Image (tube, grey):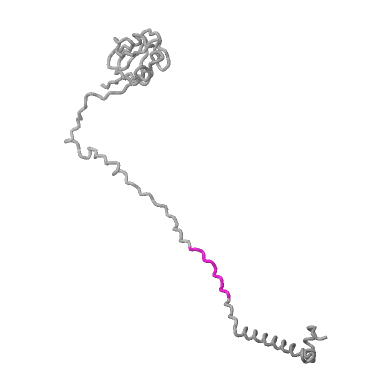
Amino acid sequence: MTKTQYRLVVRQGPIPGQVFECDRNEISIGRDIANDFVINDAEVSRRHARLTLEGDRYQIEDLKSTNGTYIDGQRLIGPHIMAIGEIIMFGDNVGVIFEGETAPPDITVISTVDLGSTPVAAIPAPIESPAQLFTPIQPKLNEYPIMEESIPEMEPETPEETAKKPINNWLLAGCGCLVVIVLLFIAVIVFIDQYEGGLYCRTPFDIIFGTLGFCP
């Protein structure tokens, strides 16, 4: 037969975390050391409350304590059957949680199946490991278009300027010499004219020198 194991765990009081196993049919709670569960607090009476096993559950009752016993904030006025998880307050300072769990059965049941007479087909095959039951599905890669390699934009070629023809230096030299000769010729005429009495004012030189203002 399965049996439930109960315990009292102090959450608020002189010794937080203290655990008291409920393994008796009757458990007395109070400040006096003669109690089964001793709580050394000034608000706890010498004989404060009592737990009594009724079948498979515990019943709590207040023993006319000065500061009272509370279950989930409600003060006890009579016996109360405890439920797992309820909070018991002894006065205002001590809070205890009523916890419990089902104990495993003490007797192991022996199987009556005769494997020798059981058909092989009736014996379940061993369960494969999760790794063998499920075949991992490889995620399908999204097919993305391959980006073409960008080609740098070529600047339009600037047409080369037409090569300038080199100036003939000999031509320039010849022109320069011609100008010098002409100027020298004019200077000679002007020089001679000073002694010849106005040669440059005679025909046909007067047309040129008269225009320049040399001839009166």
Quarter of the image that includes the C terminus = bottom right
Q: Is residue 212 above or below residue 38?
A: below
Q: Residue at x 25, y 21 (%)?
A: 1
Kindly indicate the quadrant of the structure image that contains residue 93. Answer: top left
Is residue 152 highlighted in magenta? yes
Q: Is residue 210 left or right of residue 14?
A: right
Q: Nearer the viewer, residue 55 or 118?
A: 55
Which contiguous range is marked in magenta? 151-161
Image location (x, y in percent) of residue 98: 35, 19
Q: Is residue 8 above or below residue 180?
A: above
Q: Nearer the viewer, residue 3 or 18?
A: 18
Kindly indicate the quadrant of the structure image that contains residue 178. Answer: bottom right
Kindly indicate the quadrant of the structure image that contains residue 29. Answer: top left
Is residue 163 highlighted in magenta? no
Q: Nearer the viewer, residue 40 or 79?
A: 40
Image location (x, y in percent) of residue 53: 30, 14
Q: Residue at x 24, y 39 (%)?
A: 126
Q: Main secondary structure of the magenta part?
A: loop
Q: Is residue 190 left or right of residue 123?
A: right
Image location (x, y in percent) of residue 44: 37, 11
Residue furthest out toward the left: 116
